[in-house]
Amino acid sequence: MADSLWHGFADMGSVTANGRFVVTRGLGSRIWDSTGREYLDATAGLWFTNIGHGRTEVAQAVADQLGKLAHYSGFGDLTADVTVDLAERLAAIAPVGGSKIFFTSGGSDSVDTAAKLARRYWHELGKPDKNIVVGRTKAYHGMHVAGTALAGIPANREGYGELMPDAESVEWDNAKSLLGLIERLGADRIAAFFCEPIIGAGGIYLPPEGYLAEVRQICRDHDVLFVADEVVTGFGRIGGSEWFASSRFDLAPDMMTTAKGLTSGYVPMGAVFIAPQIAEPFFAGGVWWRHGYTYGGHAGAAAAAMANLDIIEREGLLDEAARLETDLATELSPLADLDAVAEVRTGLGAVTAIQLADPAQALGAVGKLREHGVSGRAAGQGALQISPAFVMTTDEVRELAQRMHAALG
C-alpha cells in the first residue's frame, strides 16, 4: 500500500497494516469503494453531505464561477460579487434578524473566529478582563487551539500541554453547572458559552428537556455571550423544518458557527453568524479587527453554497430532514433489543446514535458494518454515528436498519 498519506484522527500504524477504505464515487445516499462495492452512507460523509452525493448542479456552479473568478482577497474593502450575494442570502435565514456574516474556511476556523471575536467584543466595551470562554464535557468544537481547549473530549487534548488557559468546562447536561461556574468565577470574567444544540462527535447526545432554553437564559441574565455551535446541526440537520436548531429552539444566539451543510461538503467553507448588537462596535467606524482567512468567502465555495441552498429550497429538503427524524426513530430504535446494543439515541433531527454495550467493540463494529454494506463511524465512547443525507428515502432507512441488524446481531 502506498503510505505517503497521513490520515486525520488515525492510528497510522494500523492503517498501514490493515489498508485504507478508499471511496471513489457517490450518488444520493450511496457510495462505492475502489473495488466497486456499494455501501449506504450512514454518516453523509462527515455530517455534511446534506443534499446527497453526485450533484452535478453544484459542480457546474463551481466550474462556472472558477471560469470567471476563482477567488480574490476578502481583506479590507475587497470581495467577490458572489460572496456578497451569499452573505445576504444567509442573513435572510439567520436565527437573529440583521445578523452579519463572517466567512471562514471551515468549522474549526468558525469556532476560533467566534472565540476571538467574543473576547475582542468585550475589549471594545471596556471589559478586557471578560475573556474566559466556556465549553461542556463531551463537546467537540473542531481542532484548532481554541476549539480543542473548549471541547470536552480529554483524549483530543492529550500530549499538547495547556493550549489556552482561559477556557473552562461545565457538565454537558446540567444548566446549574454553568450557573455555578459563573457565580464562582464572576460574570465579569466570562466572555462566552459555547453550546452544540446536540453533542455531535462526542457521542451524539440529545439535550435534556428544557436544557437549551435554561442555559440561554442564564447567559442573558449574566451578560455572557451565547455561541451556538451549529457546524453539525446547521442547515437542517436538526432544524425540524427550520434551517437551524437555533431557530427550532428559539435560542437567538449572539453568534452561531457553521460549516458542513453550508456547501454540503462539496467544497470547504464556513461562516459565523453574528447578531447585530455584537457586530455594532466593529461597524461603528474606527475599529480594525485584525482577523481573517485567505480563503474566507472563497468565490468558488460561495457559488457551491448558493447552488446547495437552491437544491435544499427547491426540493424541500428541510422537510425531508424532519421526515428522517421520524424514520430513523421508527426503523433504528428496535436495534436496542440486540445484545450488542445498550441504547439507541434518536428523536431529534436526522441524527441517531447506536450505543454499543461494549464501547471497546466500536471500531470492530464499523468493520462489521462495512461487511454488510454500510459505511459508518464510531463517535464518543462506543457509539455508532447515523447522520444520513436528507435525500435518504424511507425505504433506504429501512434497508439501513436491516443491514445494521445483520452486522450487529
Image (cartoon, helix red, strand yellow):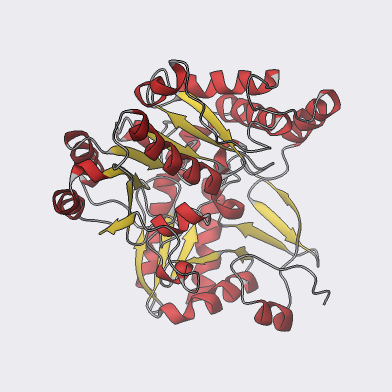
Q: Is 338 situated above or below 83?
A: below
Residue at (74% x, 28% y) in the render? 72
The quadrant in which residue 165 appears is bottom left
Residue 227 location in percent, x, y? 36, 40
From the viewer's perspective, is 347 left or right of 331? left
Please give the count of numbered marks on the rendered protein: 0
Residue 71 location in percent, x, y? 75, 30
> Residue 148: in sight, yes or no?
yes
Q: Which of these two is toward me, 200 or 227?
A: 227
The quadrant in which residue 281 appears is top left
User: Seen from this angle, which residue lies furthest top?
Assistant: 284
Q: Which of these two is toward me, 235 or 79?
A: 79
Q: Is 218 situated above or below 175?
A: above
Q: Is 312 situated above or below 10?
A: above
The quarter in which the N terminus is drawn is bottom right
Q: Which of these two is toward me, 99 or 113?
A: 113
Residue 61 location in percent, x, y? 76, 28
The quadrant in which residue 212 appears is top left
Residue at (56% x, 40% y) in the render? 261
Residue at (63% x, 23% y) in the render? 76
Residue 34 location in percent, x, y? 80, 65
> Residue 231: in sight, yes or no?
no
Q: Which of these two is toward me, 26 or 163?
A: 163
From the viewer's perspective, is 138 left or right of 301? left
